[in-house]
Structure formats: C-alpha cells, structure tokens
C-alpha cells in the first residue's frame, strides 16, 4: 500500500489496447499525449515542471466505432471535438504529471464509453383530461388573485 503513495513509483504499464465496448478498441499508440507547464498551486515547482497533460485522439481511427456514436460524441464533447474529428482533453488538476495523465485518460475513455450508449427513445404521451382541468383551474385561481389586487377607485 505504501508503494502506491510514493511519488517516484513506476507508472502502471500501458495496455495493448483500451476496450470501450465489445469490438471497440483504442490502441495506445493512437493517443497523442503532450505535456506543458500548468498554472495554479505548486510554488516555484510550477515554473520548472510540465505537469499539465493534453491528450488528443482522432475519433475516425478508433477500431469499430459506430456512426451513431460519432453523432452522440459530437453532442457530448461539444467544442472538445474539432471539425476534423480530433477529440482533445486536458488535465491540470493535480501537481504531478502521472496523476494528470491518468485523470485525462480516464475522462477520455469515459466520454467515449458514454457516446457508445444509445439514448432511450422518448415515447410521446398525451396529457390526461384531469391534468388539463387541474391546470386550467389553477390558472383561473391565479387570475382571480391578480384581479383582486387591482385598484378600484371608489367614493370616499
């Protein structure tokens, strides 16, 4: 347990591919990882070390990524997905590079997994007669309350 807490501990070895779903895999060599200096807490160390991590992935190069997932990913990722199909995420939450790298990778894989989930189709329903009547009754009640607030000039 103490070995995991050491800062100079060796990072876990890279897997041969990240499995997102059955038949959908992302080989680690397709990930472009860049490091840069991060702002924020860290004192003098922040000016010397490159702890910010940025991961880019061309979504078209994911093995077995279906077309519906491309559309859903475009909705979920927003501006993080370029017109060329490159998804870019960055992380500078932690003070060391390995934790930021893992955080960024986890967020990337979770975003891709979420895009593979099909959203449930909405079945349109109609409002019941009773609910329509309740709505109209409350509207009339509010109208009466507001009518009573009006100033009515009278003889004094």
Image (cartoon, rainbow, N blue to C red):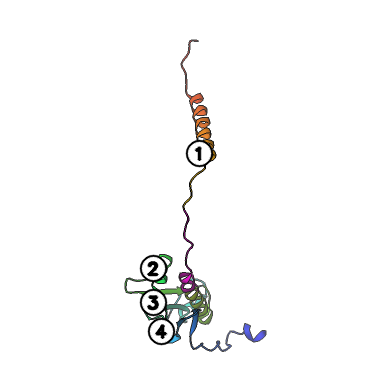
Near-viewer residue (24 or 95): 24
What number is the disc on residue 30?
4
**Is residue 125 left or right of 58 when viewed as pictured?**
right
Give the Cα separation between the discs numbered 3 and 2: 11 Å
In the rendered structure, does residue 119 fall within the stretch colored magenta?
yes
Give the Cα separation between the discs numbered 1 and 2: 37 Å
In the rendering, at what x and y percent does residue 90 appear?
44, 74
Disc number lying in front (1 or 2): 1
Q: Which residue is rendered at x = 48% and y = 13% of the image?
A: 154
Q: Which is nearer the N-term, disc 3 or disc 4?
A: 4
In the rendering, at what x and y percent does residue 135 appear?
51, 37
Q: Are marks 3 and 2 in contact (CB under 8 Å)?
A: no
Q: Quadrant of residue 3?
A: bottom right
**Is residue 3 left or right of 134 when viewed as pictured?**
right
Near-viewer residue (147 or 102): 147
Near-viewer residue (43 or 81): 81
Q: Which residues are magenta?
A: 110-123
- From what the image shows, is residue 148 above or below residue 97? above
* Quadrant of the frame with the N terminus: bottom right
In the rendering, at what x and y percent does residue 78 appear?
40, 66
Disc number lying in front (4 or 2): 2
Give the Cα separation between the discs numbered 1 and 4: 56 Å
From the image, tell me which residue sits under label 1.
132
Q: Which is nearer the N-term, disc 1 or disc 3?
A: 3
- From what the image shows, is residue 108 above or below residue 30? above
Q: Residues within 10 Å of mark 2 (few under 14, many from 20)?
A: few
Q: Which is nearer the N-term, disc 1 or disc 2?
A: 2
What number is the disc on residue 71?
2
Give the Cα separation between the discs numbered 3 and 4: 10 Å
- From what the image shows, is residue 126 above or below residue 60? above
From the image, tell me which residue sits under label 3.
59
- From what the image shows, is residue 135 above or below residue 153? below
């Amino acid at each position: 347990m103490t070995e995991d807490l050491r800062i100079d501990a060796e990072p876990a070895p890279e897997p041969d591919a990240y499995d997102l779903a059955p038949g959908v895999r992302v080989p680690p060599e397709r990930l472009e990882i860049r490091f840069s200096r991060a702002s924020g807490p860290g004192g003098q160390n922040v000016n010397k070390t490159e702890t910010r991590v940025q991961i880019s992935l061309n979504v078209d190069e994911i093995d077995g990524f279906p077309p519906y997932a491309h559309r859903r990913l475009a909705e979920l990722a927003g501006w993080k997905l370029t017109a060329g199909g490159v998804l870019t995420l960055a992380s500078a939450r932690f003070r060391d590079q390995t934790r930021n790298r893992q955080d960024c990778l986890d967020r990337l894989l979770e975003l891709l997994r979420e895009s593979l989930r099909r959203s449930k189709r909405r079945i349109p329903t109609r409002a019941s007669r009773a609910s329509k009547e309740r709505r109209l009754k409350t509207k009339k009640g509010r109208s009466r309350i507001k009518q009573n607030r009006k100033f009515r000039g009278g003889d004094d």
